[in-house]
Amino acid sequence: MSSEYAKQLGAKLRAIRTQQGLSLHGVEEKSQGRWKAVVVGSYERGDRAVTVQRLAELADFYGVPVQELLPGTTPGGAAEPPPKLVLDLERLAHVPAEKAGPLQRYAATIQSQRGDYNGKVLSIRQDDLRTLAVIYDQSPSVLTEQLISWGVLDADARRAVQHEDV
Protein backbone atom coordinates (compact mmCIF):
# COMPACT_ATOMS: atom_id res chain seq x y z
CA MET A 1 0.00 0.00 0.00
CA SER A 2 1.50 3.37 -1.01
CA SER A 3 2.02 5.86 1.78
CA GLU A 4 -0.25 8.37 0.01
CA TYR A 5 -3.04 5.79 -0.23
CA ALA A 6 -2.55 4.87 3.44
CA LYS A 7 -2.83 8.55 4.41
CA GLN A 8 -6.04 8.97 2.36
CA LEU A 9 -7.49 5.81 3.91
CA GLY A 10 -6.50 7.09 7.34
CA ALA A 11 -8.16 10.44 6.68
CA LYS A 12 -11.42 8.65 5.83
CA LEU A 13 -11.16 6.52 8.97
CA ARG A 14 -10.58 9.65 11.08
CA ALA A 15 -13.48 11.46 9.42
CA ILE A 16 -15.89 8.60 10.18
CA ARG A 17 -14.67 8.36 13.79
CA THR A 18 -14.99 12.09 14.42
CA GLN A 19 -18.41 12.23 12.73
CA GLN A 20 -19.51 9.71 15.32
CA GLY A 21 -18.13 11.91 18.09
CA LEU A 22 -15.54 9.36 19.17
CA SER A 23 -12.03 10.02 20.38
CA LEU A 24 -9.39 7.34 19.85
CA HIS A 25 -9.84 6.30 23.48
CA GLY A 26 -13.60 6.37 22.93
CA VAL A 27 -13.17 3.79 20.17
CA GLU A 28 -11.19 1.59 22.54
CA GLU A 29 -13.83 1.94 25.26
CA LYS A 30 -16.81 1.41 22.94
CA SER A 31 -15.16 -1.67 21.42
CA GLN A 32 -14.34 -3.00 24.91
CA GLY A 33 -10.64 -3.11 24.03
CA ARG A 34 -11.08 -4.81 20.65
CA TRP A 35 -9.70 -1.70 18.92
CA LYS A 36 -6.70 -0.20 20.69
CA ALA A 37 -6.43 3.59 20.47
CA VAL A 38 -2.77 3.41 19.43
CA VAL A 39 -3.55 1.00 16.58
CA VAL A 40 -6.52 2.98 15.23
CA GLY A 41 -4.42 6.15 15.50
CA SER A 42 -1.62 4.57 13.49
CA TYR A 43 -4.14 3.51 10.80
CA GLU A 44 -5.48 7.07 10.70
CA ARG A 45 -2.00 8.58 10.33
CA GLY A 46 -1.13 6.09 7.61
CA ASP A 47 1.77 4.79 9.72
CA ARG A 48 0.47 1.24 9.78
CA ALA A 49 -1.03 -0.85 6.98
CA VAL A 50 -4.50 -2.21 7.62
CA THR A 51 -5.49 -5.59 6.20
CA VAL A 52 -8.68 -6.01 4.22
CA GLN A 53 -10.06 -8.18 7.02
CA ARG A 54 -9.32 -5.57 9.71
CA LEU A 55 -10.71 -2.78 7.51
CA ALA A 56 -13.95 -4.75 7.05
CA GLU A 57 -14.15 -5.29 10.81
CA LEU A 58 -13.51 -1.60 11.48
CA ALA A 59 -16.18 -0.60 8.94
CA ASP A 60 -18.59 -2.94 10.69
CA PHE A 61 -17.68 -1.41 14.08
CA TYR A 62 -18.39 2.08 12.72
CA GLY A 63 -21.54 0.86 10.96
CA VAL A 64 -20.51 2.01 7.48
CA PRO A 65 -19.97 0.13 4.20
CA VAL A 66 -16.31 -0.70 3.53
CA GLN A 67 -16.37 1.28 0.25
CA GLU A 68 -17.03 4.47 2.26
CA LEU A 69 -13.57 4.04 3.80
CA LEU A 70 -11.70 3.49 0.55
CA PRO A 71 -9.90 6.45 -1.04
CA GLY A 72 -11.07 7.52 -4.46
CA THR A 73 -14.66 6.43 -3.96
CA THR A 74 -17.66 8.68 -3.68
CA PRO A 75 -20.59 8.02 -1.36
CA GLY A 76 -22.95 5.51 -2.91
CA GLY A 77 -20.34 4.67 -5.55
CA ALA A 78 -21.68 7.31 -7.96
CA ALA A 79 -19.45 7.70 -10.99
CA GLU A 80 -20.49 11.31 -11.52
CA PRO A 81 -21.72 13.55 -8.74
CA PRO A 82 -25.26 14.80 -9.13
CA PRO A 83 -25.62 18.41 -10.24
CA LYS A 84 -25.59 21.04 -7.53
CA LEU A 85 -28.85 22.42 -6.29
CA VAL A 86 -28.60 26.20 -6.45
CA LEU A 87 -31.47 28.40 -5.33
CA ASP A 88 -31.86 31.71 -7.14
CA LEU A 89 -32.53 34.00 -4.17
CA GLU A 90 -33.34 37.01 -6.35
CA ARG A 91 -36.17 35.10 -8.03
CA LEU A 92 -37.26 33.61 -4.72
CA ALA A 93 -37.86 37.14 -3.42
CA HIS A 94 -40.50 37.61 -6.15
CA VAL A 95 -42.47 34.43 -5.36
CA PRO A 96 -45.55 35.20 -3.20
CA ALA A 97 -44.86 34.60 0.51
CA GLU A 98 -47.84 32.26 0.88
CA LYS A 99 -46.10 29.89 -1.53
CA ALA A 100 -42.43 30.50 -0.78
CA GLY A 101 -42.54 31.42 2.93
CA PRO A 102 -41.16 28.10 4.24
CA LEU A 103 -38.42 28.08 1.59
CA GLN A 104 -37.50 31.71 2.31
CA ARG A 105 -37.20 30.98 6.05
CA TYR A 106 -35.19 27.82 5.38
CA ALA A 107 -32.82 29.66 3.02
CA ALA A 108 -32.42 32.51 5.53
CA THR A 109 -31.49 29.99 8.23
CA ILE A 110 -28.85 28.37 5.99
CA GLN A 111 -27.45 31.81 5.10
CA SER A 112 -27.25 32.70 8.78
CA GLN A 113 -25.50 29.44 9.69
CA ARG A 114 -22.98 29.85 6.87
CA GLY A 115 -22.58 33.61 7.22
CA ASP A 116 -23.30 33.72 3.48
CA TYR A 117 -25.21 36.85 2.56
CA ASN A 118 -24.36 37.40 -1.11
CA GLY A 119 -28.11 37.46 -1.71
CA LYS A 120 -27.98 36.13 -5.27
CA VAL A 121 -27.74 32.34 -5.00
CA LEU A 122 -27.55 29.66 -2.33
CA SER A 123 -26.30 26.10 -2.80
CA ILE A 124 -28.29 23.48 -0.94
CA ARG A 125 -27.68 19.78 -0.37
CA GLN A 126 -29.83 16.81 -1.32
CA ASP A 127 -30.73 16.50 2.36
CA ASP A 128 -31.99 20.09 2.35
CA LEU A 129 -34.26 19.31 -0.60
CA ARG A 130 -35.62 16.23 1.19
CA THR A 131 -36.26 18.32 4.31
CA LEU A 132 -38.02 20.98 2.27
CA ALA A 133 -40.12 18.27 0.60
CA VAL A 134 -41.31 17.17 4.06
CA ILE A 135 -42.10 20.79 4.99
CA TYR A 136 -44.08 21.24 1.77
CA ASP A 137 -45.66 17.76 2.14
CA GLN A 138 -44.49 16.73 -1.33
CA SER A 139 -42.02 14.28 -2.81
CA PRO A 140 -38.59 15.73 -3.68
CA SER A 141 -39.32 15.34 -7.39
CA VAL A 142 -42.66 17.19 -7.17
CA LEU A 143 -41.09 19.96 -5.09
CA THR A 144 -38.23 20.22 -7.58
CA GLU A 145 -40.72 20.73 -10.41
CA GLN A 146 -42.50 23.40 -8.38
CA LEU A 147 -39.23 25.24 -7.65
CA ILE A 148 -38.28 25.05 -11.33
CA SER A 149 -41.68 26.50 -12.30
CA TRP A 150 -41.09 29.39 -9.86
CA GLY A 151 -37.69 29.99 -11.50
CA VAL A 152 -35.93 29.34 -8.20
CA LEU A 153 -34.13 26.18 -9.37
CA ASP A 154 -32.51 25.54 -12.74
CA ALA A 155 -34.05 22.74 -14.82
CA ASP A 156 -30.77 20.85 -14.43
CA ALA A 157 -31.87 20.15 -10.84
CA ARG A 158 -34.11 17.38 -12.23
CA ARG A 159 -30.98 15.29 -12.73
CA ALA A 160 -30.13 15.62 -9.04
CA VAL A 161 -33.53 14.28 -8.08
CA GLN A 162 -33.25 11.47 -10.66
CA HIS A 163 -30.01 10.42 -8.91
CA GLU A 164 -32.12 10.02 -5.78
CA ASP A 165 -34.71 7.87 -7.57
CA VAL A 166 -32.14 5.43 -8.98
Image: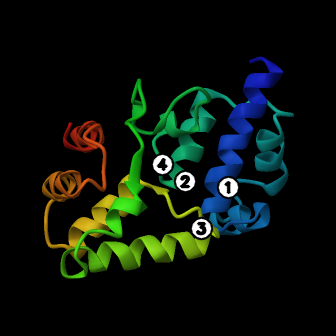
The quadrant holding residue 155 is top left
For label 2, the residue is 61
How far, Cα to Cα, is label 2 from label 3?
Answer: 41 Å
Residue 135 higher or lower than 4, as above or below: below
Q: Residues within 10 Å of mark 4 (few under 14, many from 20)?
A: few
- 47, 32: nearer the viewer: 47
Q: Residues within 10 Å of mark 1 (few under 14, many from 20)?
A: few
Q: Residues within 10 Å of mark 2 (few under 14, many from 20)?
A: some
Question: Answer yes or no: do the residues labelled 2 and 1 have beta carbons within 8 Å?
Answer: yes
Q: Position of residue 87 (x, y in %)?
A: 39, 56
How far, Cα to Cα, is label 4 from label 1?
Answer: 18 Å
Q: First in sequence: mark 3 or mark 1?
A: 1
Quadrant (top left, top right, bottom left, bottom right) of the N terminus: top right
Question: Answer yes or no: do the residues labelled 2 and 4 have beta carbons within 8 Å?
Answer: no
Q: Amino acid at mark 2?
A: Phe
How far, Cα to Cα, is label 3 from label 1?
Answer: 48 Å
For label 3, the residue is 117
